[in-house]
Image (cartoon, coloured by chain):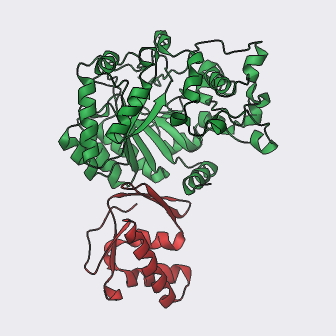
Amino acid sequence: MSLMSEVGQKAFNLGVPLAVHLDVTYRCNERCVHCYLDHDDHGEMTTAEIKDVLDQLAEAGVFFLTFSGGEVFMRRDFFELVEHARRLMFNVKIKTNAVMIHEEEARRLRALDIDTIQISVYSHRPEVHDAITKLPHSFERTIKAIRFLREQGLRVTIANVMMTVNSSDHLGVQKLAAELGVHYTLDPTITPMMDGDTSVLALRIPGEDLPEIFHNPALVGSQEEFCAPPQPPSEEDLEGYSCSAGHSFCYISPYGDVFPCVQFPLPTGNIRQQKFLDVWNLSPQMKEVRSIQAKDLTVCSSCSHVTSCTRCPGLAYVEGSMRGPSTADCEKSFYRTGVPTANMLRQGLSKPPGRVPLIQIRPIAMPA
Amino acid sequence: MPEDCIYIARSSAIAARALAGEMMVMNSANSTFFTLNEVATAIFQAADGHTPLREIVRNQICEQFDVDPEQAQADAEQFVAELAAHGILLVSNQPLAAETTR
């Protein structure tokens, strides 16, 4: 076990929130066709409120802090927030479309010793990328920004969301990432919009296309290992937990709502009304999330994939029960290994049923 | 460099946080990740740039951990040299600007 894994396990066991994803705004200068967010500002936290949250997160033991949005640079105070976070000695990662990063911003980010900057790139073809972002010349601006960041020696990761409209472009984006000297990640997840509109799910690539990704060593490493048939679970496995959501990780929205994860829209409290540690330690919802062991899962506990599946409790929650299956992950397990899941078998299916809703974030209603 | 004149300060390039009494430290420049034991954590936390290392060892280490002063000083100097080589601590024979403490 690596030192990082040991620390992660220690934080998990102690219930320390080692990592937090903080969206500082939902506003954005792009209008990506697949985005699930409402970009209007419904009262996002002020500079002072976010600084107070950062103070509280440092006190709570948070080490890894991800700033995301919306587009983080839409906030005029963004550098002030990052400076405050770095004074508190967080390891800071930033997710951005980068179109507002020029030489000066790149220099400032270097001076702040940001760990990683993750940038969305949808295609190596400008016309395809711009058609997805609906912002003319966004490809050109984003790539220029990546060059500025690399010139400063910053670590950059290109995040490539894969959907129907760019499904043939991921190899081109991978090549572009290599040319730019940056890391590359591919994500085939498309999520419903915050208002419940699921029309964007039509952009999801069909499950039948997943094997091509899962059998690409450049993306998954050892294919033999990644696509290995599932092993029967041990008793210890069945006493394990799904993921770090609510155990050592959580998500905070621009309105102060706290969730177990950015993909787990279970409201647990609001830090405009409560201290962060009170939400983290005392919220009944957080406690419930933490209580669920593999043996408690209604369908998955009897599934051969239970130890190797990427089952997301947040996606399961959106489907109806945080103890139930996440069909999107059943689909991934099936197309990764060729072995049907318990969820499929109980429905008499020999292959996954097709597109299913994945995620929906609803802000907690504020008292009048 | 005379040992009485060693001053140490935390580099501003690092991220750090205590977890159950041990300090996690990461250097963003190369993503090297360390955890410091209790003694090393005490030295790291006392690295304010203006307190001589010998004073840190005497006040923070010998008193708290009941160790031999000479051995503690030698161990501390070795530890400081190692962390300085990784860009975690800055070392000087002059007082340094203090970094943020948490």
Is A260 left, or right, of B56 in this rendering? right
Colour assignment, chain B: red
Determine the residue positioned at 52% across, 28% down: A263
Asked whether A26 or B25 is in front, the reply is: B25
Residue B37 image position (x, y, % from top left) = 54, 69
Q: Is residue A142 left or right of residue A170?
A: left
Q: How many marks?
A: 0
Check the image and name the residue furthest to the left.
Answer: A104
- Quarter holding the N terminus of chain A is bottom right
Mark yes or no: residue A158 visible.
yes
Q: Quadrant of residue A320?
A: top right
Residue at image point 75% right, 42% down:
A237
Q: Colour of chain A?
A: green
Establish if A288 lies above or below B50.
Answer: above
A196 left or right of A287?
left
Where does the image place residue A147, in percent across and percent down from the top left? 26, 39
Q: Is residue A242 visible?
A: no
From the image, which quarter does the C terminus of chain A lie in?
A: top left
Name the spot of residue B55 as percent of width and height, x first: 39, 83
A305 or B20, which lies in front? A305
Q: Position of residue B13 (x, y in %)?
A: 33, 58
In front here: B19 or A344? A344
| Front position in the image: A119 or B46 | A119
